[in-house]
Amino acid sequence: MNWNILTTEAQLAEILEKSKGRPQLIYKHSTRCGTSSMIKSRLERSAMPPEIDFHFIDLIAYRALSGKIAEELHVRHESPQVLLIQNGECTYHESHYAIDMEEIAARRMRA
């Protein structure tokens, strides 16, 4: 999997803008959490839907940006967490063991 690393608010604004033409997914990852590492590995072993751009944020290193993401997208912060963004809005979010690439792909089709 080729993650786009998210480290700035300018990148977040770009992701929101890009989501108007193409779905964007943000994976919020904690480097201090075994569950987060397991879910990241599971995602990386899954087939990526080619129509979605995948972004990764280390929420330990970029805690303030992680908070900004939750605020901008009106979702409760969790870790690990995926946020599917379409048309500038979070249309699907899930956390912990409920994160599943097939469900992400299915949500993309329904939105």
Image: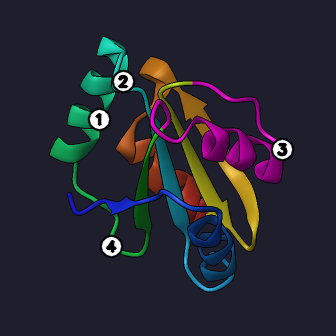
Residue at which label 3 appears:
74
What distance separates the C-alpha of mark 1 from that of mark 3? 23 Å
Distance from the alpha carbon under mark 4 to that under mark 1: 18 Å
Q: Mark 2 highlights which residue?
A: 36
Q: x, y percentage for residue 90?
A: 72, 54
The image position of residue 102, as x and y in percent, is 38, 46
Disc 2 to disc 1: CB gap under 8 Å: yes
Q: Is residue 107 left or right of residue 45?
A: right
Occupied quadrant, residue 97: top left
Q: Earlier in the sequence, mark 4 or mark 2?
A: 2
Q: What amino acid does circle 4 point to?
A: Pro
Query: Real-space Cα distance between discs 3 and 2?
Result: 22 Å
**Residue 71 magenta-highlighted:** yes
Residue displayed at 41% across by 26% down: 30
Disc on res. 40: 1
Which residue position is annotated with label 4? 50
Mark 4 or 1 closer to N-term?
Answer: 1
Closer to the camera in the image, 34 or 106: 34
Q: Earlier in the sequence, mark 4 or mark 3?
A: 4
Is disc 1 placed on a helix, strand or loop? helix
